[in-house]
Amino acid sequence: MLTMEEQEKIRLLYEEEGKSLSEIVRMTGLNYRTVRRYAYKEDWNAEAALQAENSPVLGERMATIDRWLEEDLKVPRKQRHTARRIYDRLVEECGYRGS
């Protein structure tokens, strides 16, 4: 994602200076699609839509994993869970059958 200054620069080059999208691409070194998105953007106050978190495989086990990770913050760095250790604990303690 571009900073607000970069977005504003694209908008100014396109709307006020009348530069073409290709010229802006050459000047900024950005991708054509990125330049087009910000040059054509009308509502600058709209927030990006957040994607809903969906984890059908882990489901109710997410709370358990979060609890383990919060407990890890209290122990030395070398003693914290790795992704492999979290998986092994899920298999042993929760009967997890995912991959």
Image (tube, rainbow, N blue to C red):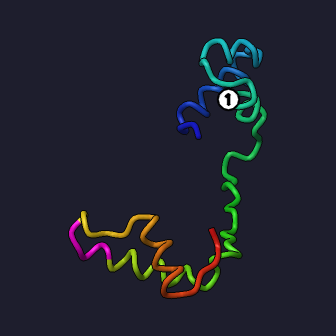
Residue at numbered disc 1: 11
Q: Is residue 92 above or below residue 17?
A: below
The residue located at (54%, 87%) in the rendering is 94
The residue located at (33%, 80%) in the rendering is 71
Q: Nearer the viewer, residue 36 or 59?
A: 59
Q: Quadrant of residue 26?
A: top right
Q: Nearer the viewer, residue 52 or 37?
A: 52
Rendering coords of residue 68 (x, y %): 40, 79
The residue segment tinted magenta is 72-76
Rendering coords of residue 47 (x, y %): 66, 56
Magenta stretch, main secondary structure, is loop
Q: Is residue 4 above or below residue 31?
A: below
The residue located at (60%, 18%) in the rendering is 28
Q: Is residue 51 above or below residue 10?
A: below
Q: Quadrant of residue 24?
A: top right
Rendering coords of residue 54 (x, y %): 69, 71
Residue type indicated by callout 1: Arg
Indicate the quadrant containing the N terminus: top left, top right, bottom left or bottom right.
Answer: top right
In this picture, residue 66 sits left or right of residue 22: left
In this picture, residue 92 sits left or right of residue 50: left
Q: Residue furthest left?
A: 76
Q: Quadrant of residue 99?
A: bottom right
Q: Nearer the viewer, residue 87 or 67?
A: 87
Q: Is residue 82 above or below residue 36?
A: below
* Helix, strand or loop status at disc 1: helix
